[in-house]
Amino acid sequence: MSAGGGTRFQEKLTDRSGSWSRTYRDLVVGPEASWARLVYFEIATLLAGDLPGALGLGLRRILFRPLFGAIGRRVVLGRGLTLRCARDIRIGDDVWIDERCSLNAMTGAGGIAIGNGSLVSRDTILISKGGPLRLGERVNLGARCLISSIGGVEIGDCALIAGGCYIGGGRYHMADRERSIASQGTYSEGPVAIGRDAWIGAHAVILDGVRVGRGAVVAAGAVVSKHVPDFAIVAGIPARELKER
């Protein structure tokens, strides 16, 4: 039984076997990172992290580039961007990441990859807790989305994800009534896959292990707990197929 990313994060915070500075380094830039990398991260964030206007965009493009595992051309990084373990984050060309987004690639989880031409709107959180998180090319993520990868999340090219959606997550073990649910760890029933050209309406929930087919439409507010066929239109809680496109 393995603990999920959130549980490991709490364990790291409460572990008194190491120094506070080492704990901070491990969580922010990764346990294998050098102290020099942490110092550079701190300086880059201080100088450019919240700087407004064109000057802020330009400085973030220059100063944040060495932090990533890979970053393409003409990438826009909005102010207030939160980065964790950025060396496990790969960003393609012409990607726009809006203000106050959070990209957390917990070390050993498989990292985050964002394909060419994708948009990540403001206040969106992408977190790779226990499996990789992959966005294809020209994916459009609306504001305030949360995508959490436990068993893996893959979103196909040209997918539209409206604002306020929740995708992924995991499931908690809870058989032992004498222990807290949080302490029993998480598991996944498989990766989440959203097909090419799918459209996920505002505030929809796509649960762990679900596949949404190519060109499918998920109505606003739906909770999807079962696979959705290609080109199907689903709605409701739990989501049910209404018709095909």
Image (cartoon, rainbow, N blue to C red):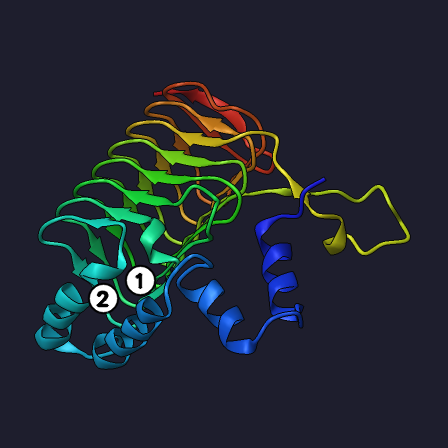
Q: Residue at x 14, y 64 (%)?
A: 61
Question: What amino acid type should be assigned to the residue bearing mark 2?
Answer: Gly
Q: Is residue 29 left or right of residue 55?
A: right
Helix, strand or loop under label 2: loop
Q: Is residue 204 left or right of residue 99?
A: right
**Measured along the vertical axis of the image, is residue 127 above or below residue 191?**
below
Q: Residue at x 49, y 40 (%)?
A: 131
**Measured along the vertical axis of the image, is residue 184 above or below residue 125?**
above
Q: Which residue is mark 1?
A: 122
Position in image of residue 143 (x %, y %): 34, 57
Asked if disc 1 and disc 2 are in contact, CB closer than 8 Å, the reply is yes
As rendered, which of 28 and 116 lies closer to the eye? 28
Q: Residues within 10 Å of mark 1 (few under 14, many from 20)?
A: many
* Residue 238 falls in image quadrant: top right
Q: Which mark is residue 214?
A: none
Position in image of residue 190 (x %, y %): 56, 29
Position in image of residue 8 (x %, y %): 61, 56
